[in-house]
Amino acid sequence: MPYTKRRRLVSSAVAVVLGATALTACGSSSDDGGARSGPVSLTYWTWAPGMDKVVDLWNKGPGKEEQITVTVKKQASGDTLVTKILTAHKAGKAPDLVQAEYQALPTLVSNDALADIAEHVGDVKDRFADGVWQQTTLGTDAVYAVPQDIGPMMFYYREDLFEEYGLSVPATWEQFAETARKVKKVAPDKDLTTFSANDSGLFAGLAQQAGARWWTTSGDKWKVGIDDGATRKVAEFWGGLVEEGAIDNQPMYTPAWNKALNTGKQIAWVSAVWAPGTLTTAAPDTRGKWAMAPLPQWSDGESRTGSWGGSSTAVTTDSRHKEAAAEFAAWLNTDGDALNALAKESGIYPASTSAQLSGAFTSPPEYFANQPDFYKKAARIAETTAPSAWGPNVNVAYTAFKDAFGAAAKNRSDFTAALGTMQKETVADLEKQGFGVAR
Amino acid sequence: MRSARRRGSYGVKRAPYLFLVPATALFLLFFALPIGYALWLSLRKVRVSGLGLGSGARTEVWAGLENYTGALSDSELLGGALRVLGYGCIVVPVMLGLALLFALMLDSERVRLAPFTRLAIFLPYAVPGVVAALLWGFLYLPDVSPFYFVLDELGLPQPDLLDGGPLYLALSNIAVWGGTGFNMIVIYTALRAIPAEVYEAAKLDGATPLQIALRIKIPMVAPSLVLTFFFSIIATLQVFNEPTTLKPLTNSVSTTWSPLMKVYQDAFGNGDIHAAAAQATLIALVTLVLSFGFLRAADRGNKRDAGQGDAR
C-alpha cells in the first residue's frame, strides 16, 4: 500500500512540475490573469537613497488605483547585491523587483534570475537612447530591465587653478597628457589627476570611449576582447603617464584623495555625471571652483564618451506578478513625476532622455552653481555615449582589473601586461564554467 | 510499589539522553548541518552550456575533488597562505611577548596604578577589528596622518607603511595593538592564581624578583601561554578584517591577500560558491592540523618535563 501511495505522490508532483512548466511556457500572462483580480503586493530591492519616498508616490497614486503595492527593501549596492539576488533566486525567493547595474545584467540573466518583460514594457523603448536600451536586451529580442540612471563620463577640472597655471581644457587625450606634464612643471607637488585602480568601472568606461567591446557573441560562443587594440591604447596611455610620474598612482575614495581634491593637490578628475555629489562630500571647500567639460577625445573633432555607473530596474523570474512588476518598473523610469522624485530624493541622473532637461535638471547642481548650463551640456554629452558590451562574468574581469592594475600602478610598471592578465583570467573563468568561448 | 520503582529507574536511565537532546539538536542544526552542506557544495560545480543565457543553461553537476585540486594548485591561494605566514611570524611572537611582559610587570609588587594600566592595555581589545583597522589606516596615510605631519616638520624620512615589507608591519601592528590586552588578561589571571607560599619560599631561598619571574612565574603560567598561542594561531590564519579594511586605501593589498579574503572573493565577488566551499574546507583542515598539532606537541613537552621532574 505505501508503495502505491508514494507513486501517486510522485506522479502528482510530476504533474505539478509539468503544469508549472506549461504555465511558464505560455508566458506570464496566464498567471498574471489571476493576479489581476485581487490586490498585488511587490517587493523591491534597491540601494538608491530615498527610494521609499518615490515608491510612496506610486502606492498613493497609480498603484492605489490598480491595487499594486510596492515595498522597498534597502540594500547594499553593486556586486554584493548581485550575489544576494542570486542566492535568493537559488532558494526561489528573489524579490519581484531588483535594481541592477547594467554590467550585472548578463550575469543575472545567465543565472536565469531575470524575467523577459518585453511584452509588458514594449512601448517604453523610445524614451531611451539606443545605446542605453541595448544594454537591457543583451542584443536579443528579450527585454530584461528598464533603464533607470546613466553615468556618461566627463572631465572635471579646477577652473581657477587651470587659469592660474595657464592651462587650457584638453580636447584630446594627447593634450591631456601635455596638460599633466605642464602641471608637474608649473607646480611640481601638484598632480593633474590620479590613475586609480580601485574602481574598474572607470577603466571600463574609458575603454568603451576608445571603442572597445569587451564581450561579444558569435553564434554560440562568447568572444572576450579585453586585450584588444582599443583597450590597449587606453592602458598604454595611462600606464605611460603613471610611469613617467606625470600623474599620481594612488587610489580614489580614500581620505588622502579627498584631501588632495579639497586642497587643490589634484586639480582635475575624469569622472561621470554624478561627480557633483561625490565632490560635495570629498571637496567641500572648493565648491564653485570646479567646471565640467566633455571627456578628452582620441582624435580631434570626435565626440564620444564612455559610461561609468548607471543601473536599471528588473523583474525576477521568481516574481508571481511579472506584469504588475513590469508596469511599476516602466512607471518608475518613464513617468515625469516619478523621475522628478528620483532626481530629488535619490540624486540620480535619469536614463530617460526627456527627463534629462526637465524638472530638477533645469538648474545646475548646487556645487556647480558657477556653470548654469551644466545639465544642458550633460545631456548633449550623454547623447554621445558609445555602446557598451557586457558579458556574463564582468565581476571576475573587474576583480582581475583591481588586482593587476593595482599592482602595476603601485610599481609604475607595464599596464599592457596587467591588461593581458585581465584578459587571461576572464577567459579562463568563462572556460572553467563551461561557456562557449571563441578564441 | 515495585513496578513504580522500576518505572522510576527506567525514567532515570533515560534522563541523561533527554537532557542531551537540546544540545545535540542545536549542534546538528547549526554546526553539523552547515558543515555538511559546505562539504556537499565543495564536491559540486556549476556547468554552463553555450552562451549561458536563458533558462536551463546552467546546471549543477558533480565535480568530485575537482574544486580541491583547483584550490591546491591555485597560486593565489598559496601566495595568500605565505603572506599570512609572514604576517603570523610577526604578530604571534610580538603579541604574546608583550602580553607576557605586561602581565609580569602588572603582577610585580612595586607596580603603581595597576587597575588603570590593566584597563588601558586591555581597552584596544574592546575596539571592533574593523574600527581599529580604519583608525590605523588613517594614521598610515601620509596625507592625513598626524605622525607624518610631525615627521615632516622634523625633516625625518617618511616611510610608506602601506607598501612592500612595511605593509606587514602595518598590518601586524593593528593585530598586536588589538590582541595584546586580551592575552595579557589571560596570562595575568593565571599569575594571580599562583599561591603566595611559592613566592615566599623562593624569597626565603634568596631569589631576586627577576629570578622569580623567570624560574617560577613563567613555568607556572605555561598552560595559559599554550592556550594564548593556540588562540593566536587560529586568529592569524583567519585574518580578514584588517587587510579588507585597508584594501581600499592602497594598491598593495589585493582582493585575495589572505586565504579567507580569497574565499570571500570567490563566494561573493565571483559567485563561485563551490570553489569557495572547497577552499574554506581546506583552510579549516589546515587550521585544525596546525592548532591541534601544536596542542599535542605542547602536551608531549609537558609530560616529558614532568617525567624529568620525577626522575630528579
Image: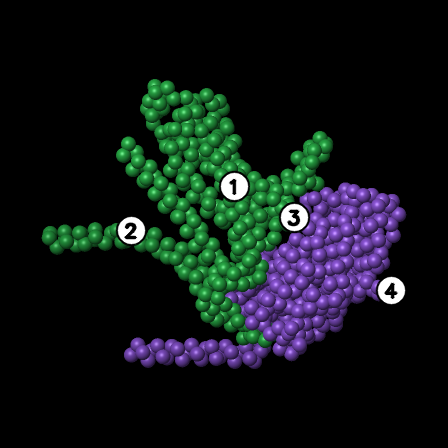
Chain colours: A purple, B green
Chain where mark 2 sits: B
The spot of residue A346 in percent (x, y) is 68, 56
Image height of A43 relative to B186, above or below: below
State the mark number for residue B294.
Answer: none
Spatial CA distance of label 4 from label 1 is: 58 Å
| Residue type highlighted by circle 1 | Val
Q: Which residue is mark 1?
A: B91
State the mark number for residue A301.
Answer: 4
The spot of residue A26 in percent (x, y) is 56, 80
Element marked by disc 3: loop
Rendered residue at 60%/74% (across/down): A436
Spatial CA distance of label 4 from label 3 is: 37 Å
Q: Residues within 10 Å of mark 2 (few under 14, many from 20)?
A: few
Q: Earlier in the sequence, mark 1 or mark 3?
A: 1
Element marked by disc 2: helix
Q: Residues within 10 Å of mark 3 (few under 14, many from 20)?
A: many
Q: Which residue is mark 3?
A: B250
Image height of A244 relative to B37, above or below: above
